[in-house]
Amino acid sequence: MRAVRRTVVTAAATAAALTALTACTAKSDAEDGDAIRVTAADDTCETSAKTVPAGHVTLKIENEGSKATEVEIVFPDDRIVSEKENIGPGTKYTLTAEVKAGSYEIACRPGMKGHGVRQKLTVTGGGTAAKRDPRLDEAVAEYRQYAQDQADETLPRVETFVKAVKAGDVAAAKKAYAVSRLGWERTEPVAESFGDIDPKVDVREDGLEDGQKWTGWHRLEKALWQDGKIGAEEKTLADRLVADLKDWQKRVGKADITPTSMANGAKELLDEVATGKVTGEEDRYAHTDLVDFKGNVEGAQKAYELLKPVAAKNDPALTGELDKQFASLEALLDKYRTDKADKTSYEFVSYDKVGKEQRKELSDAVNALAEPLSKLAAAVVVK
């Protein structure tokens, strides 16, 4: 779950946006002199160029503000075409993208909320599409089916959860809650690409925009674990959760998926772990964060495995490191299974029982994987 969402777009519009720009969160091979320097602060967003030719564009971002910020390349109607979240105060990041001719904006969003401060960006010329290894088309097709399968498998699990909520059975609802989220967590970047579904089903209370009604899993989580009761409003919200997820299920097949969006999505899933699960903020009432953690890692690994044949050809050292770090993180997660002999179980210890040093160990393992994973998108682009 991203910290905040704010744009409602159609699936078709999102697909057009993603087709127009393919982003990589790895370091660019462009020279610094060709990059657009973006200096973000608490109420300003300065860019060193307003016009660039079509093709690859690199943003060299520096956050000089006091808050974490998010920097995006967007169309004027707010369709996000590339972004980097959680750029901490005093830190830098490089974002490389492939853009076609058109009008865009570079947005800095201090605190990762609201419309942000924006600068116009005009991309001139026709541009050319990146070359693609034919095996990547197979990877995209398989990943699209994987995302659809996850949505299809989610609905029965959610219906079991909702049935318990509507029956007023708090214990049964608690038992069904975490596993009902797995398919969503595995494919969250695809779900987020639609813009309007995620704020309905997966927003936390502190991520609400002004005037936004709190709905979805986490609203029901609070009722079950903190309030300990289910009222008429919760039963209505349970029905709405099913309806919103059915909408997601119908639209998954229309998502625009590319090899680099798969790679970037895998990195985004690790970012989700780092900013929500490791901190214990995601499931703050249920403390089922390790189930979501596991789902995010599985989704990232699926995208990686599908892209691996091409990435291994282009950068064998990278895939060797990724294999190592995925295995290390999986082994660490296994330590927190309640039944360590059953590797297929999604029963994990309550996250409030995981101590400070253990959380640091998990965080270190996530960071060790995230760093090489940030280079995967570049490794699948044929130069």
Image: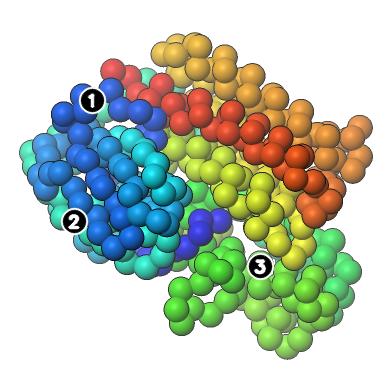
Instruction: Give the labeled residue for mark 3.
Output: 218
Quick check: 349 left or right of 149? right
Image coordinates of residue 38 in percent, x first then y, are 24, 45
Quick check: 204 left or right of 54? right
Taking the spot 76% from the left edge, 31% from the top edge, the residue there is 332
Q: Is residue 221 above or below residue 54?
A: below
User: Which amino acid, mark 1?
Assistant: Ala
Query: CB of mark 2 within 8 Å of CB of mark 1?
Result: no
Question: What numbered label is drawn on residue 119?
Answer: 2
| Lower sequence index among marks 2 and 1 | 1
Foreground residue among 3 and 176: 3
Foreground residue among 37 and 211: 37
User: Which amino acid, mark 2?
Assistant: Gln
Q: Secondary structure at mark 1?
A: loop
Instruction: Give the labeled residue for mark 1.
Output: 30
Q: Secondary structure at mark 2?
A: strand
Q: Is residue 373 above or below residue 116?
A: above
Q: Which quarter of the rendered picture does the N terminus lie within? A: bottom right
Query: CB of mark 2 within 8 Å of CB of mark 3?
Result: no
